Amino acid sequence: FKLQIVQNVDMNTMEPASGFVVAVDAVGAGEGEMVLCCAGSSARMTGTTEERPVDSVIVAIVDSAELNGTQVYEK
């Protein structure tokens, strides 16, 4: 598996927050892309990670995000 270091994001400001996660990349994400991660037992439920010892997985690449009716991120 390709491993990615994922930086947390503050959901109110969409700015980088403290903390990082190492996640298995199940979708082919690239550097600088915003992604969605899944952790814990749910991380082992994707087609790529099923029955594997995975604790965190990237499950989606975000194209755009809206917060309270305002677009706050666009790829």
Image (spheres, rainbow, N blue to C red):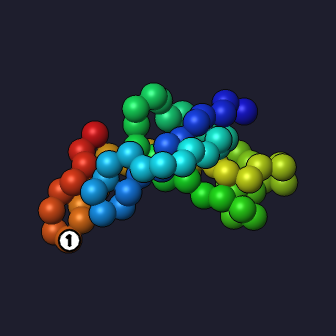
**Quarter where residue 38 is shown:** bottom right
Q: Residue at x 20, y 71 (%)?
A: 68
Q: Residue at x 25, y 49 (%)?
A: 73
Q: Residue at x 83, y 49 (%)?
A: 52
Left or right side of 7 for 57: right
Q: Mark 1 falls on what kind of element?
A: loop
Q: Residue at x 40, y 32 (%)?
A: 32
**Quarter where residue 26 is shown:** top right
Relative image position of residue 72 (x, y in whole percent): 21, 54
Q: Is residue 38 above or below residue 30?
A: below
Q: Is residue 43 above or below residue 34?
A: below
Count of numbered circles on the image: 1
Q: Residue furthest left?
A: 70
Quarter holding the C terminus is top left
Amino acid on which the number 1 mark rests in the picture: Asn
Left or right side of 57 for 67: left
Q: Residue furthest bottom?
A: 68
Relative image position of residue 33 (x, y in whole percent): 40, 37
10 Å crowding of disc 1: few (<14), some (14-19), many (20+): few
The residue to which callout 1 is attached is 68
Q: Residue furthest front?
A: 18
Quarter holding the N terminus is top right
Q: Is residue 41 above or below residue 29?
A: below
- Residue 21 in view (yes/no): yes
- Residue 45 in view (yes/no): no
**Quarter where residue 41 is shown:** bottom right
Left or right side of 27 for 75: left
Relative image position of residue 3 (x, y in whole percent): 66, 33
